[in-house]
Amino acid sequence: MANDITINIDGVDYSRFLDFSLKRDLDDFCGETRLTVNATRDIKTGILNSFPIKDAAEVIMACDGEPILTGYVTGIIVDTTTNQHNISYIINDKTVDLIDNRLDSKQINTPITFDNLIKKVLDLSNIESINPVFGKIYAAKSTFSNKIAVINNAGLIDKFLLSEKIRMRSSEEAYNFINRYADKRQIVVNTDGNGNIVINAIGSETAETMLKNIDGAKDNNMRYSNFSSSSRHRFNKYIVRSMYKKSKGTTAPSVGIAYDNEIRSSRVITIMGSTSLTNAECKKRAEWEANIRKMKSFKYTAGVIGFRQKSDDIKSLGFAGNPLWKINQMVMVQDQDSNIEDEMLIKTVVYNQSADKGSTCDLTLVKKQYYTDSLNEAFLRKRQDKEVGQVMFKLPTSN
C-alpha cells in the first residue's frame, strides 16, 4: 500500500500519528519538520506523560520506505495547560548546519568545479563529504549517517576559471555563499530525502503522469485547483536607467526600454540600475523585468490524492515506476475549469496525511520561465526570501 509514512528517531521506529504535513519548495535549501505530541497527566501520579525525543536526535523519515527527510531535532517547544501539554519537535535536514554556519573570509583557489566548490564549503564546515551513488532510488537506511554527498543532476557545469575570483565574505552563511555561485552557473541547489546536496538544472525531470481535470474524462486525477492572475505589478513600458556607462571617458547616463503590449499604455515604471550598466545591459534588464513580472503574476495550485503519481500499489512498480510528486518536475496540465493546457514546473509540494482526510498532495506550479529568465540574468537576480518547508505531526499518546 502506498503513502505509508514512518519516522525513525535515534534508531526507534514510529508510524502512528494523527496528522502529517511536509512541505518542499524549489527555493528551499533545507527543509524543516515539526513533530507535535499531545500528552496528558497520569491520573494516579499527576505527572505529565512525555515523549522520548531529545534535542539533537537523529531522524530518518520515509514514505513507503523511500527517504523524504534525513536530519536532526533542532528545537523543542513545550506548551502546557492544566490537563495536558503539547510538545513540538522541530526537525531539519542534515544541511541545516550550512544554513547556520557563518564562516571566515576566504579566497577559494580557481580553477574549480561547482561540485568541488560545495565540497570545499563542507570541509570548512567540518562536514565529511562522500561520493554519491547514481542510477537507483534506495530505501531509507535504518542507521543514520552525518556524512553528506554532493549529487550533480545538472550535467556538465562550466568550471570557475583561473580568471574568476571566488571569495567567501566574512561571516557569510555557508548556504548563501553556495547560492551566490549557483546563480552564476544558472543552477539551483536543494537537499534530497537522504540529506544530501543536489545540484539541478531547472525542470530537469518530467513527471510520469499528467495533471488532468476535464469534464467527463475517466482519468482525471485532480481533486481541486486554484488559479489567479493579476496585472497590478505589470506595466506597459519599462525604463531602466544607470548612473554611468561602462565605457571609459564618459559619465553620460545609460537607458534601456522594453514594452509589454498586453498591458495598457498608461502604466509606466522607471527602475534605477544598482550597478553601472551600458545601454544594451539596461535594455536587457528592462526586458527581464517585463518578463519576470509577467511570470509572477500567474499563480496556480492543484491537489491530488496520494503522494505518488500513480494509484498503483508501490510494491508492483517500485520507487522509479511510481515516483513521488516532487519539486523541479515538468508536468503537463489540462485543467478545463482554469482554462489551462500547458507544461508547467512544480515549484512547491506539500504532502498531507490525516485520519479523516487520508493522503493528499498540494502542488504549486509556475511557468518554467519563472526561474529560467531570472537565472539567465544572474547578475541582476535577487533571490527571494526563502520559505522553510514544514512538516507537522500529531501523535497519540497513552496515559
Image: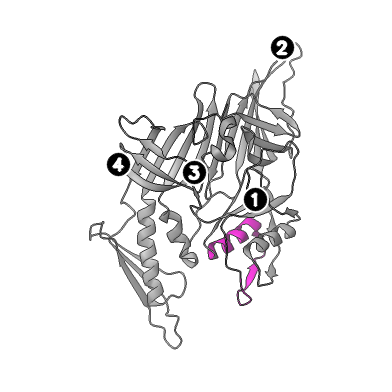
- Label 2 – label 1 distance at C-alpha: 54 Å
Residue 227 position in % (x across, y down): 35, 41
Q: Quadrant of the C terminus?
A: top right
- Label 1 – label 3 distance at C-alpha: 25 Å
Dot 1 falls on a residue whose secondary structure is loop
Please give the name of the residue rendered at 57% of the width and 68% of the height, measured from the top-left corner: 158
Q: Which mark is residue 348?
A: 3
Dot 4 falls on a residue whose secondary structure is loop
| Front: mark 3 or 2 | 3
Check disc 2 and give the amino acid type.
Answer: Ile
Crowding around mark 3 (Cα neighbors within 10 Å: few <14, some 14 to 19, many 20+) is many
Q: Which residues are magenta?
A: 160-184
Crowding around mark 1 (Cα neighbors within 10 Å: few <14, some 14 to 19, many 20+) is few
Whether 174 is among the magenta residues is yes
Residue carrying label 1 = 134
| Front: mark 4 or 1 | 1
Earlier in the chain: of badge 4 and badge 3, it is 4
Q: Which mark is residue 339?
A: 4
| Front: mark 2 or 1 | 1
Q: Which mark is residue 56?
A: none
* Mark 1 touches mark 3? (CB < 8 Å): no
Residue 134 position in % (x across, y down): 65, 50
Check disc 3 and give the amino acid type.
Answer: Thr
- Label 4 – label 2 distance at C-alpha: 58 Å
Q: Quadrant of the N terminus?
A: top right
Earlier in the chain: of badge 4 and badge 2, it is 2
Crowding around mark 4 (Cα neighbors within 10 Å: few <14, some 14 to 19, many 20+) is few
**Residue sitting at the far left:** 265
